Amino acid sequence: REIMPQPMIWANLKSQGDVPGERFGHSLTAVGNTFVLFGGIDMNTKNTKIAPNNEVYTLRIDKVKCTWNKETTTGDVPLPRAHHSAVALPGDKLFIFGGYYNQKVRLNDGCILTLSNNTWKRPSNEHEITDPNNDEHPAGGPSPRANHSACVLGNKVYIFGGHGGIGYERRIFNDMHCWDIETHEWTKIEYEGLPTDPRCGHSAFGVGNRIYIYGGMNNEAYFNNIVYLDLESSEWTDPEIPTDIPRWNHGHMMVEAIPTWKYFIFGGLIGEFSEGTPRTVGTYNNQTWFLDLLEADPQKWKWNKVETEDKPNPVLPLSREHPSMVYDKRDSRLIVFGGWHNQWINDVWAINVGIIVGPPYAITEMDPALGQLSGGTKVIVKGVGYVDASNITVRFISGKQYVDAQASYISETELSCITPSFEHIGPKEAEVRLQIKGGDLTITSSKFLFFMNTRAYKSLAYGPGLIDKQAIGTMTEFLIQARNELGENRRSGRDHFEVRITIVNDEADEEGAEGEKLETEIIDNDDGTYIVKYQAEQACKVKVEIIFENEKGELVPIRGSPIIASFDEGTTQANSNILTGPLQNTYLHNLLKELEEFIKETNSGINLKDKNVKEDVKQLLKVKEHLKNIEEQHDSTILKLDVADECLKYYDKQEMAKDIDLKKIKRLFDQWSQLQKTAKETRKEIAPVVQVESEKTKQQIKQLEDKLKSYHTELKKKDFYFYSTGVEKALESLKTVDKDIQLFDETIDDLGYNAKMFGFPDAIEQSQKSVENIKVDVSNVQQLWIHSKECIAIFEGYEKTSWTETSPFEMEDEVKKQMKRLNEIKVDRKCHAYQGINDLIKKWLKFLPLIAELRDKSIRDRHWATLKQMVGKEFTIDENFKVMDIWNLNLNQHAEAVEELTDQARQEAKMEATIAKLKETWADVDFELQQHKDTNINLLKMIDDHFDMLEEHQMNVQNMMASRFLATFEEEVLYWQKTLGQVMEVYQLLSEVQKSWSFLENLFIHSEEVKKELPNEAEKFVGIDLEVKDFLKNGEQVKNIHKFCNQDKIYNRLESARDKLTECEKALNDFMDGKRRAFPRFYFVSPMDLLDILSSGNNPAKVMDHMSKVFLAINTLELKETPGDRPSAVGMHACIGKEYVEFSTPLKLIGKVEVYLQDVIDTMRSSLRTIAGKSVQNFQSMDRNDWLLQDPSQITLLVNLINWVICVEKALSGGNSAAALKTAYENQVKMLTELIKLVQGDLDRPVRTKVMCMITMDTHGRDIIDKLLQQGCTSPDEFQWQSQLKGNWDTAKNDSRLNICDAQMWYSYEYLGNGPRLVVTPLTDRIYVTATQALHLMMGCAPAGPAGTGKTETTKDLANCMGKACYVFNCSPQMDYLSMGNIFKGLSASGSWGCFDEFNRLLPAVLSVCSVQFKAVTDAIKEKKERFIIEGQEISLDPTCGAFITMNPGYLGRAELPEGLKSLFRPITVVVPDLELICENFLMAEGFIGAKVLARKFTTLYVLCKDLLSKQMHYDWGLRAIKSVLVVAGMFKRAEPELSEQALLMRALRDFNLPKIVTDDLPIFYGLLGDIFPGVEAERKRDMRFEDICCTATKENKLHPDPEFIMKVVQLSELLEIRHCVFIMGPPGAGKTSCWRILGKAQDLDSRKTMAVDINPKSVTPDELYGFVQPATREWRDGLLSRHMRDLANMKDTNPKWIVLDGDIDANWIENMNSVMDDNKTLTLASNERVSLKPHMRMLFEIRNLKFASPATVSRAGILYISDEKGYQWR
């Protein structure tokens, strides 16, 4: 909006509400932000006597209307009164004093109204007055009075004047009393000197330590002056600042404006009479005046009349006396109410005085008060009342034009501003005002002068510091004069000049290096000049560069820069180097003389008198030269004149200038100006002559060009262009050409000068180019012949070299250099001389490689014989054999044959060496012996290096076989091909046999269970065992691998052994399949674990190690040992949470392992059902808190659900269901409150977990009852109730049944441990309905939706509600159809549920088979079969089994499900759940009282973070991130219960989100936290002891313990406390590896020995990382990660174990980790093995970014982001 005040006109505001009647003698006071009306005389009561009242009204005002509200007050209500006084007190209180009670009685009591409760109270030293009678004040206060004044100053109220008296006394007062606001004590002020006149109807205000009185009247006079009482001296003073006419009974208001307060008056009576003349009655008035309190001295105050802006016909309030007046700060308005004008008045008028009062801030000064026209000057805007705001506008005004600039807050009295460009307005003085936060412009202003910018090309410098022969060792100086665009000297400073002074020496010049720099000092004189001082300590030359920084920030040299000056040892005068010293005087004298001589000489030179320019060309050229000098030296001459002029002006200021010099410089400027005019005339006069001579010169140049062209053509025919001429003759012939060129140069110089002077210097260029071309051609030919001479000499030397001393490679390199040099000579390639030497060099380049070939060491006698036969010549290779002899053999004609011969020689030499190496190597390669378990048998192994070598040698032999030069060594190569092939085949077969035998030996030899089950195979294996041991013993004796593998029939014998082992292995697999069918949960156990279980079946204690792999929640059974017999199981220990459940009857673990494990399942279920039955009965009879603690967690939750259902259905079945439901709701809230109180106490972890689950369930119960109430549910048959999962106890069957809609399921009593439960939201309820209906319809269920919405967890939670075992499988491309088939077999036979996470990651082919497999299961359930066929096997069927597939549609690496498979699963779309409800439930479960409010704050923060923070790939604001922070908040709550809940939650949100926030987002994140938790401060919870340990570990590792790095280490430690998977992110070099390594070292020092396994997942394939099933043999090949994770999990200690995956993330490998990274904490492998991540184990991912990760991955891990922006990594 336009930042101008509103128009200053009166407006009549419409009154509404409890409008008070017409009145006068009242008071209207601003108390805080409220306007309070009290008392006065009104006419509201008809037919009664007119009298004062004690009514209280409050007034609220907006733009066009006002609203009255009559207040009801209590307490010591004061008597009615009029013409009293009223002032506002601190704490929103109103104080009233005195006034008329009736026509005869005045009052002198006080009373205080507190607005917050509308209560009146008398001061402590006053008593109640019921019958006033003009009595004295009981506490020494003023006499009874009215029409007096009151004002507040400091902590006192001052009462002055008025009309009244004690008893029947009638008088006008001039006394003053003060009332202490705190003590309520009255004090009368005793005056010094003469008192002021008595008066009433006046007004008063307090400023400083003075009370000011204005206007009023008494029986003798009316007053128009101001008087004041000095409270320090107690003296009255009249400062003589009268208004135009006396005034009394007016309205008044003091407004605290900036920079000066304003005292407003309105209306009243005005009039005057001279002493001794009859008094006149005053006239009513409606004028408004204000007193401007300009300074502390009142004599400078000034009255001003308020002139409205609606002239010539202004709208004004009715003239009146006794109006009340207040000020509306918000809209800068004066408000006038009521009064008397021969009648009572109750109208409300307002006038905006913003243009007078101004905003609550003011401008006083600009520093500096001037700046350049282009803007960019930094100024300090001084003033008062400034506030820190983002929107502060400074306006620069010139007439009707203005430019705005933004300012920055410094303090209450200073702002910083960069001036804007004023170029479109021009160099003028601007008026400056400002505006803050969109308020009004200041009414005060300051001035700012915009001057034209300094220009470097106009500025200059002068002084001794810029001339020669300055004195050394003494400070020298010069002066810079800044000038603007018009060449005018600047009159102010603050420009930015940079002076660089460098010592110049010859060495520096030659080397291009800079000399020593001298220090300079620049002094700004603030008048446009700048003094520069510097000093040289030795005789030298200096380069002075003077550079100006313009408004664009460009550095531009000033006129004349750089300048060379010098220092001389011979200059010794002390004052030589000062501006007025002898050196500058001499320079100035010489400069004036030089200018005078130059102008005189030039003037003479261009004067045509006595010059015959028409005939004498030389004279003409002289004149032209002088004219050219005038043109070229124009700028330098002007600079010299300006320098001399400025220097003389400076001297003149110093009163040192000579009149003769001042006149001379003026004359020189005039002479230079005249010289310009003369030059112009001379040019005009000689123009015709110049034209003629120019034509002559052009003709001569043309003739020269033709001559040069002809000469160049003839040059090509000279003898030195032919190779046959010979070197010496060619070089001699070239010398004659040099003389011709010299003559051409002289002619060009003469003609060139003439052309230049006549103005066409380019005309000679063509001739110059022609001569240059001739020179280049001659030079190139000369270089060619010199080079030819060198080459011929080199070749002659080579020919004489002996064969035995020949170095062909060096020779070839030298010849290549000569060829390169030849090619660098820019001579015509068709030239005969060039072709001759080129051919010769090429012959040698072809010949020398042949020599090099024949010099090869691989050349044997047989090869020389072949060469002699080839060339048809005989020769002997000895010391007399020369290179010339080889040259004469003409080998160039047989080049290909020679190369073929030497190639054959080299290849044969290589074969010979390779065969020798094979013989030598394999003679020493032996088996490495490895002891087999604890036996004396050794396994045979070839170390990896030898195996790699074998492959390499086979490749070498194969290459030799493919060689065309094989013939010489064919027999030996064939031998090694066969031998090494045999080694490879035999060793691979041996490895298979050893591996299979090692595996089977443990079972068939040492397992009684296997011997009993497979007697034939066990007997057969005894023979195989002896045979294999014979192989191993033989290998141990032979040792050498080559000999062992090439024994007769060794391969056939090993192949036979392998076949026998395969038969045993197949029998074993069939045996295991039988065991799986007998006990279906074995389908979920890996083959190795199953064999271990089977082999340990007779020893149940050993089987306990595998219990958690068979049962999801049982860690181990409590065994009771019986000597000499199998133990009995008496109870079970949980592996989910901590809990022990005793069996109802002990179970003897007898029989086969699959039998007694099935008995464990039956006992587990029967025990839990028995406990449930008892718990149902105990619930009614026991205290709920006691009952809560006695049973296993799942039974407690089940029975709680059953009783909740009974309670709700009872309420719905009664007559008054609404009332009954409300009662049920209240009972539910009561029970929930008790649980929250319980969880706030000191509970152990298992009990706390159980109570938190109860709170979660009870909260859902409460919400459901509330929902039933809201929807008006009246019957248990309504859908709102039927759609809930309900538990019932069937007393007939003594069992629990679950109902939801028309689906009924019996509770399965699978032991679930003591783990957390999911918060049930409306989304969860919908999933329950859909999932149970799918099971009811004998289908699978397919929840699909984005990552982190709770698909898998909801499925598991539903299984928990039904007491089912739910196995989660992380689907991956490694799983084939057979693996899936085994899973379906296990699920259908055991009655378990399977949750296939990321199901659409399976390969399309596998998905297709899955549809057939699962259809077989669903068909069998529909047909109610007990057994059915799947994958060719008959399997028993438990119809309560179920399959759930969860999917993230559209993510990378996901396949589309086949239509046939889709039809078997009922789909559910899972959207984002109610995060606020989840937060609220979690917080309640953690014991937070204000859970609802905190949940709203939490979710609001995450929504804002998602919207406002940058879109980083690693940011996750979803459900998993929320849950982590809530867990932390709960830990904080228990650790520091005394802290406020807001502070605890804010700390958790801050400390556990900071690690992932990037640097640029931190200010926004902190801002959001501050907005959502205003005023909440919570220090980061720090473990200083551990931080010290981290510092120690850092130093021990030779690193610097930077606080930022230590914080990252600690943040990682804190993240690992709450997240089992953490991404450590950051750019390379940020310190990611150092971070986790230092944390590990710190934990070692803290007695927590940390083991870390570091793996690069990108260095292997996903199959090699996780393991895979070999399709042909179904053998499981373990992966790198799976093996390490299993090994760490099997370690007995609970010290921290970390798996660090150091490599960039992509969907190919990371998606297989999903079930590890979520709450399942289980790695599911393609072998159906399930490796659990133990509580003390963590997964760390060291990555650069999450560019290729899906949201499913991002949401599953905590994030530690390490930035390198602060650079602490390398500082």
Image (cartoon, helix red, strand yellow):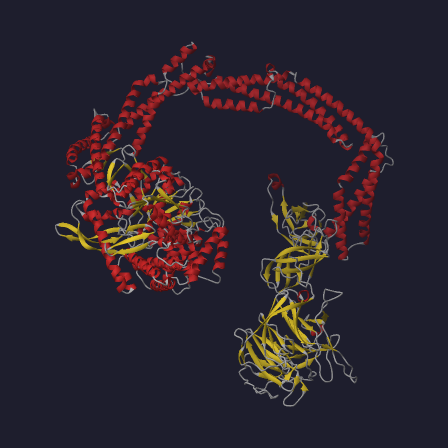
Among all residues in the image, which is located at the extreme front? 1215
Among all residues in the image, which is located at the extreme bottom? 168
Name the side, left or right, on which 699 lies relative to 1416: right
Say if residue 66 shows up in the picture.
yes
In which quadrant will I find the N terminus? bottom right
Query: In the depicted view, which residue is nearer to us: 247 or 1410?
Result: 1410
Say if residue 1587 shows up in the picture.
no
Among all residues in the image, which is located at the extreme left? 1124
Does 397 sit above or below residue 35?
above
- Where, by quadrant of the figure, is residue 127 drawn? bottom right
Among all residues in the image, which is located at the extreme right? 610
Residue 1744 percent location from the top left of the image: 43, 44
Does 1748 sit above or below residue 1224?
above
Query: In the depicted view, which residue is nearer to us: 167 or 1546?
Result: 167
Labels in figure, total? 0
Does 777 sit above or below residue 656?
above
Residue 1563 percent location from the top left of the image: 50, 54
Residue at left offset 73%, top offset 64%: 310
Residue 305 percent location from the top left of the image: 73, 70
- Where, by quadrant of the figure, is residue 1080 drawn? top left
Query: In the depicted view, which residue is nearer to us: 916 or 69?
Result: 69
Does 1175 sit above or below residue 1627?
below
Name the side, left or right, on which 421 lies relative to 863: right
Residue 318 percent location from the top left of the image: 71, 72
